[in-house]
Amino acid sequence: MTTTINVKELLNNYLEQGKILIAVDSNIEGTVLPDYLKNSIQVKLNLSHKFDTTVFEIDEDKVTVDLSFSGKKFMCSIPFAAIYYVAMAEDPLNGVEIIENMPFELLKLSYEITLAAEAEREIEDKDIDFLSNIPAEKADSINKNLGLDERAAELTRRGKPMPSKSDAIDKMFDEFMELVKHDGIRESLSDISGKIHSTKARTKKKATNEIKLSKKHFNKDKK
């Protein structure tokens, strides 16, 4: 069951602590802001009882306040339905999302980023230690032939860390497959590896694109 946030109470509670930040969708009907802030889903405003305002009212369904924009006063009217994020100004990343007011575009972006993160975690959870899937005696032989112990010792002498499991697998997989091809497991391991690398490639491309998008979370401060 979804709980509707009491925006008036939320704003008042935050304002009691000091200057706050609110994210506003200026496309919402009834929103009155300077012309250059219209038709935007990412308007960021600061509010505080300490600002030099002549009007600052929080009614049952909107905020009315005269704010200064580039040194000029403007009477703003912000419906609660247009406010989708509230945080302390000095800690903008740890606020409260009002999901029911969140613009569709941002919900979609958030969902896609979440999917990419979950896919990456799933890959990490299913990362396969190939040597653990074959008999111990054969694993020791492969380990010796690949020189893993010698490589680790050499890197230690040089003061460098041993490559991660995924890096080692990527670099030595061809050698490994050649060594185990006579043990009747090459086909199954190749299939597993193909799925892993294919999924990693798709996830890495998607996650990279969306990280770039997520960096520009809000417009510049308006006080």
Image (cartoon, grey):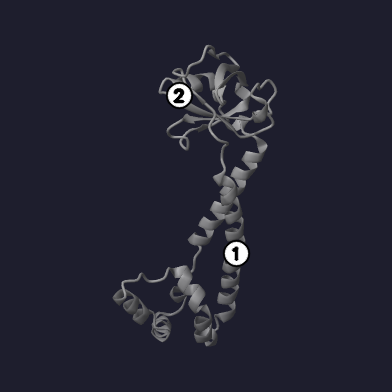
Q: Nearer the viewer, residue 204 or 63?
A: 63
Residue 216 bears which disc, if any? Answer: none
Determine whether 189 is above or below 95 in the image: below
Q: Which residue sits furthest front?
A: 71
Name the image quarter holding the N terminus. Answer: top right
Q: Is residue 144 above or below residue 37?
A: below
* The image quarter in which residue 111 lies: top right
- For disc 1, the marked residue is 201
One can see residue 129 in this view: no
150 to 39, vertically: above or below: below
| 217 or 192, nearer to the observer | 217
Residue farthest along the left direction in this orientation: 157
The x and y percentages for residue 7 are 54, 22
SS at circle 2: helix
Kindly indicate the quadrant of the structure image that contains residue 159. Answer: bottom left
Q: Who's the residue at 68% across and 20% down the image? A: 30
User: Which mark is nearer the camera, 2 or 1?
Assistant: 2
Q: The disc labelled 1 sits on which kind of residue? A: Ala
Closer to the chain start, of discs 2 and 1, is 2
Q: Decide which of 145, 16 is in the foreground and name it.
A: 16
Amino acid under disc 2: Tyr
**CA separation in Å, label 2 and label 1:** 43 Å
Give x and y (percent) for residue 114: 56, 48
- Residue nearer the viewer, 108 or 79: 79
**Around disc 2, counting alpha carbons within 10 Å, would you say few (fewer than 14), some (14 to 19), or many (20 or more)?**
some
Q: Which mark is residue 14?
A: 2
Q: Secondary structure at mark 1?
A: helix
Report the residue that reaches farthest toward the top. 54
Residue at x 49% of width, y 61% of height? 124
Q: Residues within 10 Å of mark 1 (few under 14, many from 20)?
A: few
Expressed as whole percent of the image width and height from the top left, the position of residue 106 reads 62, 39
